[in-house]
Image (cartoon, grey):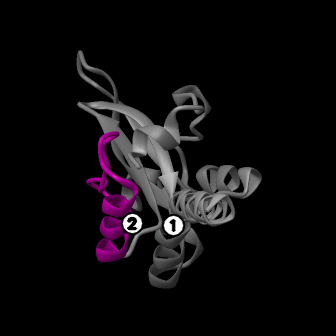
Amino acid sequence: MQISHLLADRSVDDIIACTAQDSVRDAVARLAGKRIGAMPVLGSAEGEGVELLGVFSERDVIYRLAEEGSPCLDRPVASVMSAPAITATPDMTVDEAQGLMTRRRIRHLPVVDGRELSGFISIGDLVKSKIGEVESEAEAMRSYIQSS
């Protein structure tokens, strides 16, 4: 199954994001308020519209807090985000995305189509998709066995 299939019923307008200029404190509040672990960091590229600049995650915050303590909360997201972002494409398969996440030890992937952000997926989205595939295959097997 391709990533585009996972994004078919989602709108890019529903992606929770922040900007590079937001304070870490504000971005942490957004993560906590939405009960999510990461979000894309968006900014304006000159003449290009909105651009994916990186990913801001709870891990970024934890590492910075361990290094410098609470002063990092008043810094801009740009100073703590993971950049450049590791990305997926809509035509990538779920298995390819899972492999990428495993190799790079990440739990969230922005999905880009050309230069445009078209989605944001988590390892949970991929696991849910794989479970759905296994359940569908099991049901098909049961139906086949019962009809034989």
Q: Is residue 91 above or below residue 27?
A: above
Residue carrying label 1: 72
Count of picture labels: 2
Which of discs 2 and 1 lies nearer the camera? The answer is 2
Image spot of residue 112 (x, y percent)? 33, 38
Q: Are marks 2 and 1 in contact (CB under 8 Å)?
A: no
Q: Secondary structure at mark 2?
A: helix
Amino acid under disc 2 = Gln
- Which numbered disc covers residue 98? 2
The residue drawn where x is 38% and y is 34% is 117
Instruction: Please say whether residue 21 is visible from this viewpoint.
Output: no
Q: Is residue 119 above or below residue 13?
A: below
Q: Quadrant of residue 25?
A: bottom right
Q: Secondary structure at mark 1?
A: helix
Quadrant holding the C terminus: bottom right
Span highlighted in magenta in the image: 82-104
The residue drawn where x is 72% and y is 50% is 34
Asked if residue 84 is among those painted magenta in the image, a careful observer would answer yes
- Label 1 crowding class (10 Å Cα cut-off): few <14, some 14-19, many 20+? some
- Which numbered disc covers residue 49? none
